[in-house]
């Protein structure tokens, strides 16, 4: 069992800060709940894993594949639109609003 990796996972500073904040809240507002703080610490591991997994998923969504028109640089989710745009751009040296309205927003690199 890869205990060290698990431990590294648990040492995600954001998760530790979050758990400490919750324990502090318990301490100030509901001291009778403090006995459950041990349970909370046990939950750090699965919690941080879920957190990391959701972060990874977000990263994957960002790198979604798009088709870029080589003429104007607009990107499209659909290869068809990218082709149409490229054809139009080559012919007219300007962008067709109807086509570019299908473009996806992209962070400038
Ligand atoms: Zn284009």
Image (tube, grey):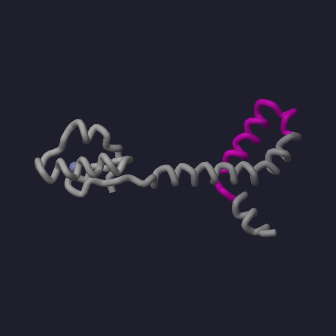
Left or right of 10, for residue 59:
left
Look at the image and say whether residue 17 sits in the magenta stretch. yes
Left or right of 106, for residue 12:
right
Q: Quadrant of residue 102?
A: top left
Residue at the image position 25 percent from the left and 40 percent from the top: 99
Residue at the image position 77 percent from the left and 69 percent from the top: 2
Residue at the image position 75 percent from the left and 54 percent from the top: 45
Left or right of 79, for residue 40:
right
Could you say which is closer to the camera, residue 33 or residue 63?
A: 63
- Number of marks present in the image shown: 0
* Quarter occupied by the N terminus: bottom right
Residue 45 vs 4, above or below: the answer is above
Q: Position of residue 104 (x, y in %)?
A: 35, 44
Q: Which residues are magenta?
A: 11-34
Q: Position of residue 69 (x, y in %)?
A: 26, 53
Could you say which is closer to the camera, residue 105 or residue 18?
A: 105
Residue 15 vs 33, above or below: the answer is below
Q: Position of residue 21 (x, y in %)?
A: 70, 42
Residue at the image position 61 percent from the left and 49 percent from the top: 54
Q: Main secondary structure of the magenta part?
A: helix
* Quarter occupied by the C terminus: bottom left
Look at the image and say whether residue 14 sits in the magenta stretch. yes
Residue 33 vs 62, above or below: the answer is above
Could you say which is closer to the camera, residue 15 or residue 79?
A: 79
Q: Residue farthest to the top?
A: 29
Q: Position of residue 95 (x, y in %)?
A: 17, 44
């Amino acid at each position: 069992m890869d205990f060290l990796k698990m431990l590294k996972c648990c040492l995600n500073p954001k998760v530790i800060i979050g758990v400490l904040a919750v324990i502090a809240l318990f301490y100030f507002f509901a001291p009778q709940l403090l006995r459950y703080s041990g349970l909370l610490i046990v939950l750090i591991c699965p919690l941080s894993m879920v957190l990391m997994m959701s972060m990874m998923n977000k990263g994957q969504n960002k790198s979604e594949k798009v088709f870029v028109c080589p003429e104007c640089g607009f990107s499209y989710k659909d290869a068809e639109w990218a082709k149409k745009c490229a054809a139009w751009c080559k012919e007219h040296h300007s962008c067709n609003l109807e086509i570019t309205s299908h473009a996806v927003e992209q962070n400038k690199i």
